[in-house]
Amino acid sequence: GAGVSQTPSNKVTEKGKYVELRCDPISGHTALYWYRQSLGQGPEFLIYFQGTGAADDSGLPNDRFFAVRPEGSVSTLKIQRTERGDSAVYLCASSPSGLPSYNEQFFGPGTRLTVL
Amino acid sequence: AQSVAQPEDQVNVAEGNPLTVKCTYSVSGNPYLFWYVQYPNRGLQFLLKYITGDNLVKGSYGFEAEFNKSQTSFHLKKPSALVSDSALYFCAVRGPGEGYQKVTFGTGTKLQVIP
């Protein structure tokens, strides 16, 4: 079956611009996670959705970052006034449910964001 | 705060030899522990997890891991390495201090299996 998909696969933008990154989770998965992975690092938690609501957004680095999941399926990560330090691979993952919380996650291939 | 340490950036092992990739964690309370693998140009894939019960857990592709509470470790092992096992391996933890919702990953260990 179809896995988690993310678009675009690559995004190059200029400092100060606005970007949107999209994640299509596996059908029926209610839990959705966003991570940021910098070179040589492990994935860094950003936000977790259970259904339409953000259950935990404690990993968002500042108010330039925002994510939505209006219908409980597709999610969009939005970054305003991009900075060069935002350059990273942004990963999305889904799981059948956030509870029980020992469910493993299914990851997408990521979006590589480069801010010039 | 919960944390994970993978002390080795890279592990080299000859094909056919046993391999170990190390992971230690820090959480308050009982952890949920995971191993994921990342192949080049592909997303992370789940290998195995420890929730409770038997300290030795078995996962995909012949991998296993041993939970050691006293040493706060969850090392990944395989009896006989294959060249195709060469990849980047990540250990991850969920703990009660973060409501078991937030997943913290280690920095990853590159496994190189030499033919």
Image: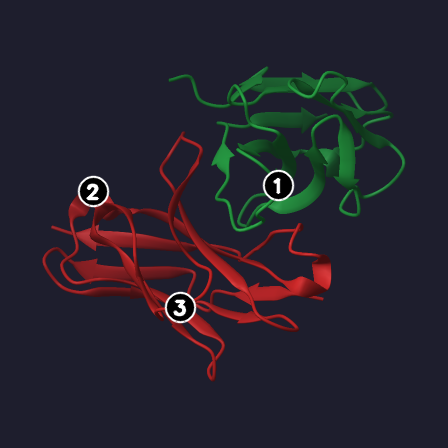
Chain colours: A green, B red
Q: What label does residue A98 carry, if any?
A: 1
Q: Which of B87 and A12 is in front in this view?
A: B87
Q: What label does residue B53 carry, if any?
A: 3
How far from the left and from the top, in percent, is residue A14? Answer: 77, 20
Helix, strand or loop under label 3: loop
Q: What label does residue B84 carry, if any?
A: 2
Q: Which residue is drawn at 66% across and 73% down?
A: B28
> Disc 1 is attached to a residue of which chain?
A
> Disc 2 is attached to a residue of which chain?
B
Count neighbours of disc 3 (C-alpha within 10 A) and say few if under 14, some if 14 to 19, many if 20 or more: few
Count neighbours of disc 1 (C-alpha within 10 A) and say few if under 14, some if 14 to 19, many if 20 or more: many
| Mark closer to the observer (2, 3) | 3
How far from the left and from the top, in percent, is residue B87? Answer: 33, 45
Left or right of residue B33: residue A77: right
Among numbered discs 2 and 3, the one appearing first in the sequence: 3
How far from the left and from the top, in percent, is residue B38? Answer: 40, 41
Q: Which amino acid does label 1 sit on?
A: Gly
How far from the left and from the top, in percent, is residue A65? Answer: 82, 32
Q: Residue at x 37, y 53 (%)?
A: B110
